Every structure is written in structure tokens, then in C-alpha cells.
């Protein structure tokens, strides 16, 4: 036997390979969408890591939204048109 030296949070994901774990992960994905890792970590008694994941996920979402808005602004400025809303640009 050997030790890979994985931290508990890493091990909670890479070590999830039995049927019950995979079933639980699929259920969490269905119930919580992209936020399923939060609930997985909490179920593995790693609540602090789940909270941290949720914080970082929210930051990532906000940054992605800001980048998308900047790109929309650049596109509308290049065309000399009034700024499009996100809904108008994707319609």
C-alpha cells in the first residue's frame, strides 16, 4: 500500500468511485446543478471547504458576467450602436 499524500478535500473527489458515491454525486448534480460540489463537501464533513467553494464560485460567476458585459460593450461601440443588453445580444 502507498500514500499519495492527498488532502481530505482532494480525496473526497478523487476517492469517490463506489456506486453509492457516484449515485449521490449524480443526485446532487440534479438537485443543485453547478453548485453540487458544495453539498458533496458538506456531506463529507468538509463544510468549511464547501463554504469556500461557494464563495469562489460566486466570485467566478461575477467575473464571468463582467467580462461578458465588457465584450458586449466593445461590440456595440465598434458598430456605433447603443449598448445592447445581455438579453438583446443573445436573442
Image: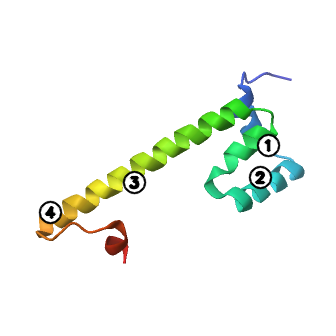
Pointer 2 or 4: first along the chain? 2
Q: Which mark is residue 77?
A: 4
Q: Which mark is residue 65?
A: 3
Q: Which mark is residue 25?
A: 2
| Residue 22 screen position, x and y as percent | 81, 52
Q: CA distance from mark 3 to mark 1?
A: 32 Å
* Front position among marks 2 and 1: 2
**Secondary structure beneath label 2:** helix
| Residue 1 screen position, x and y as percent | 86, 23
Q: Are marks 2 and 1 in contact (CB under 8 Å)?
A: yes
| Residue 75 screen position, x and y as percent | 21, 64
* Front position among marks 3 and 1: 3
Query: At 67% from the left edge and 32% from the top edge, which residue is drawn?
Result: 49
* Front position among marks 3 and 2: 3
Q: Quadrant of the C terminus?
A: bottom left
| Residue 80 screen position, x and y as percent | 10, 69
Q: CA distance from mark 2 to mark 4?
A: 44 Å
Q: Which residue is mark 1?
A: 16
Pointer 4 or 3: first along the chain? 3
**Dot 1 surroundings within 10 Å: few (below 14), some, or many (20 or more)?**
few
Q: Hey, which residue is sitting farthest bottom in the picture? A: 91
Pointer 3 or 1: first along the chain? 1
Q: Are marks 3 and 2 in contact (CB under 8 Å)?
A: no
Query: At 74% from the left edge and 39% from the top edge, which residue is drawn?
Result: 41
Amino acid at each position: 500500500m502507498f500514500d499519495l499524500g492527498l488532502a481530505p478535500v482532494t480525496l473526497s473527489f478523487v476517492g469517490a468511485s463506489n456506486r453509492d458515491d457516484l449515485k449521490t454525486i449524480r443526485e446532487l448534480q440534479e438537485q443543485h446543478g453547478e453548485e453540487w460540489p458544495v453539498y458533496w463537501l458538506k456531506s463529507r464533513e468538509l463544510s468549511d471547504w464547501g463554504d469556500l467553494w461557494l464563495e469562489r464560485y460566486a466570485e467566478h460567476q461575477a467575473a464571468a458576467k463582467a467580462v461578458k458585459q465588457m465584450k458586449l460593450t466593445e461590440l456595440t461601440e465598434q458598430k456605433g450602436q447603443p449598448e445592447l443588453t445581455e438579453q438583446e445580444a443573445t436573442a
